[in-house]
Image (tube, rainbow, N blue to C red):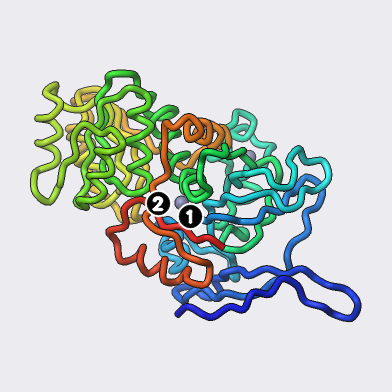
Amino acid sequence: MASDVTPVTSVTSGTSVTPVMSAAVLRALGKPLETEVRPRPVPGPGQVLIRVRAAGLCHTDLHLTDGSAVTPPLPIVLGHEIAGEVAEAGEGTAVRPGDRVLAYYYEGCGRCGWCAEGSENLCPSPAAKVGFDSDGGLSEYHLASARRLVPIADSVAFAEAAVLGCSGTTAVRAIRCVARVAPAETVAVIGAGGVGLAVVQVAVADGARVITVDPHGPSREQALRYGADTALDPAATDPVAAVRAATGAGGCDVVVDTVGSEHTPGQAVRMARTRGRVVLVGYTGRPAALDVLDIVVRETEIRGSVGATLADAHTVMEMAASGLIRGCVEAEYPLERVNEALARLAEGGVTGRLVVTP
Ligand SMILES: [Zn+2]
Ligand SMILES: [Zn+2]
């Protein structure tokens, strides 16, 4: 599936030279991405052209390529986890060429009540959801609005910054803003994928005692390295009974479900103590069974947590600069091998995330 790409940096037509770039383009749902040469965008006022150094892939990209959860407009350049250097800064921007930046993927309308309170993740008519409805980072260059750029410290690798732009930000929102985890609370995290491993790290950074549940051994080991106290294999033990036994207080204060299968939300409720908080982050699009009586009699608080805000992106990049959170990257692929990376992701069993380095 990988195509050989001869590097082309510009095309000449008549006397003018147009700079170009390679981009991986989704032209049809369910089909491999096509690497093609396109004109390099020119930043207008308030815009910045970024030389992409790392673009993370997550399961959302699989849902987008086959249209199973969200149908993107076609053709589109996917990639919502984007880190790189400023190549060209448009008029009225505060960045300079060479600055290391995360291009946060979500840009609210800037006019609604949700945007006004800084909750642009809830904006009903966002200006852009980059990599979902407008061109993203699987490209040598990415044109971004300056207001969604977040500085990356020199100590943080581009690949780690890119994946934290999705997984870390989601974790900050779920743990700090939605679950409101307090020091010494117990937090169970279902799923130790990219988001789950970030949730573990934010909860540990905030002083919680963390139990992680995942069938994939290397992911459990990574969760322990990130500071989880206990890592349970749900294939080997009843995860609900094991979590309740490990907490010894009738369940956890907080349970975060990063999987969202038919079974995990119900397990999350049963892992939580009376008046515990359950945060649903993962989803599959399929319905899940919940024991309503159990929720009623134990006054369980259940909340969803969707994406994150620009403020969360600033928080996670500051945490990364202080060494409080790491982006977990299993492997890096050049742009022309992006389909191989997507196939690897679909296969399952990736520890953390895969990153494309255009
Ligand atoms: Zn993502
Ligand atoms: Zn809005």
Q: According to the image, label 2 marks what residue?
A: 329
Screen quadrant of the N terminus: bottom left
Between residue 268 and residue 292, name the one nearer to us. 268
Contact? badges 2 and 1 (CB < 8 Å): yes
> In the picture, residue 238 is in which quadrant?
top left
- For ligand 2, the image quadrant comes to top right
Judged by depth in the image, the label closer to the viewer, 2 or 1, is: 2
Residue at the spot x=39%, y=24% of the render? Answer: 180
Compared to residue 47, the image places residue 317 above or below, namely above
Give coordinates of residue 116: x percent, y percent.
64, 30
Displayed quadrant of residue 276: top left
Report if the beta carbon of the residue with label 1 is closer than 8 angstroms to ligand 1. yes
Is 190 on the left or on the right of 166, as rendered? left
Q: Position of residue 140 (x, y in %)?
A: 63, 63
Can you give x and y, in whole percent of width and height, for residue 221 in the image? Answer: 23, 44
Q: Nearer the N terminus, badge 2 or badge 1?
A: 1
Residue 300 in view of the camera: no
On screen, residue 45 above or below 229? below
Residue receiving disc 1: 56
Q: Residues within 10 Å of mark 2 (few under 14, many from 20)?
A: some
Which amino acid type is marked by label 2?
Val
